[in-house]
Image (spheres, grey):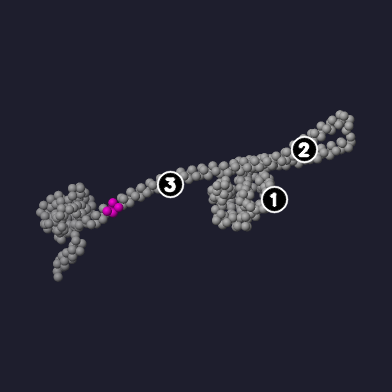
Amino acid sequence: MPPMVESDKLLDLVLWSTGDELWQLDLVADQFTRANPLRHLKASSHVLVRNASELRSEIHPDDRAEFDRTFTVHLKAESDHWDVSYRARDVQGEWRWLRTRGRVVARTPEGRALRLVGTTGDVTEFKHHEIELELLNHELESRVSQRTEALDRSNQELLSRLDELRQLQAHLVNAEKMAALGGLVAGVSHEINTPLGIGVTAASHLEQETRRLGLELEAGTLSRERLVQFRQMAMESAQLILRNLKRADELVRSFKQVAVDQSSEDRRELDLAVYLQEIITSLKPAFKKTPYRIELECEPSIRINTYPGAIYQIVANMVMNSLKHGFENCVEGTIRLLVSRQGDHIVLDYRDNGQGMAEDVRRRIFEPFFTTRRGTGGSGLGMHIVWNLATQILGGSITCESAPGEGTRFEWRIPAD
């Protein structure tokens, strides 16, 4: 079989398999020739079209501008090939999407196009899928935009609620601190009344005896035995007054330092053993009329530059937690605070031998607003304040160990420097 015949058959097979129309446009003669024409199209009823320029009228009016633009660009050799999609009517009068691709194969020496060769295929089905996909993408973009806007609104609302919650929490924390300070004031005031009352009574008795002694001296009835008795009574009264005034002075000094530290956020250097003893002294009124006691064991000469108010608040909250919860229904109880230096940290080991906690309670002990006394005055912030102060203010850590019937242990570590 001659090579030309073989090439023609191969071309026919390619056109048949693709379903495309092969065309040739002679610009000089204005003739359009087709091979394997698209018979279902109105404009493809003839293999040879002598007035090729009239075929443009078969193109959808909305697509003619793009058709002309791309055609002109290629004729001017401003593009490597011509590729355009457009609509044309079929024999039923319906619009079909076509894709035409071609190339100039002959030009004059001056570059004017003489002849084009190319193919035209029906891409209606693919175009419909493309349009549907574009619509779907647009719909998806619209949905994503709407969801994004809704999410942004939700985020703003959540941020606003979170800010309100933080403000509320800060308010409750401050209220808890002031409540603790108020309790400290009430307890210390009550505790000071006792030594002051004894001192006033002793001073009043000494005044009465002194007045009696003066009357006896004026009357000339003062005896040596009476003078010795007055001397003994005066000495005992003075000692009693001094002891109670000293006791009141200790309470006032402890209360003053602790109250200042609690209401201030300033750092200062302190002797940890001395300061912890001051805290325990200020908390002693809470143990009055209870079978419970608190013990302190602290290594001497531990000096630290830290926030004393935070240390007071932690110890006070732990003690009150033990008294309110740990020792509930206990006939006796002991709190032990063991303090030591371990490397670069100060370790404060707080223990009580109370009733302990169940595991589900222990796991949530530091959560804000968690309390086992809901509705009975518990705010649920006491131990959360402890965690916040130990980790955020003092820059340390705190852990809790407890089991029913085995008491509770808190170990908190703070940097020594």
Q: Which residues are magenta?
A: 132-136
Q: Nearer the viewer, residue 390 or 171?
A: 171
Residue bearing mark 2:
202
In this image, 397 relative to 34: left or right? right
Label 3, label 2: how far apart the Cα atoms are: 70 Å
**In the rendered image, is residue 325 in sight?**
yes
At 62% from the left and 55% from the top, the residue drawn is 355
The image position of residue 92, as x and y in percent, is 15, 55
In this image, 74 relative to 393: left or right? left
**Which is more N-terminal, label 1 or label 2?**
2
Under mark 3, the amino acid is Asn
The image position of residue 349, as x and y in percent, is 64, 53
Q: Nearer the viewer, mark 3 or mark 2?
A: 2
Q: Nearer the viewer, residue 202 or 82?
A: 202
Under mark 2, the amino acid is Ala
At 21% from the left and 50% from the top, the residue drawn is 70
In the rendered view, tell whether residue 357 sits above or below residue 376. Answer: below
Residue bearing mark 3:
155
Q: Nearer the viewer, mark 2 or mark 1?
A: 2
Provide the secondary structure element on which disc 2 rests.
helix
The image position of residue 240, as x and y in percent, is 77, 40
**In the rendered image, is residue 110 in sight?**
no
Under mark 1, the amino acid is Pro
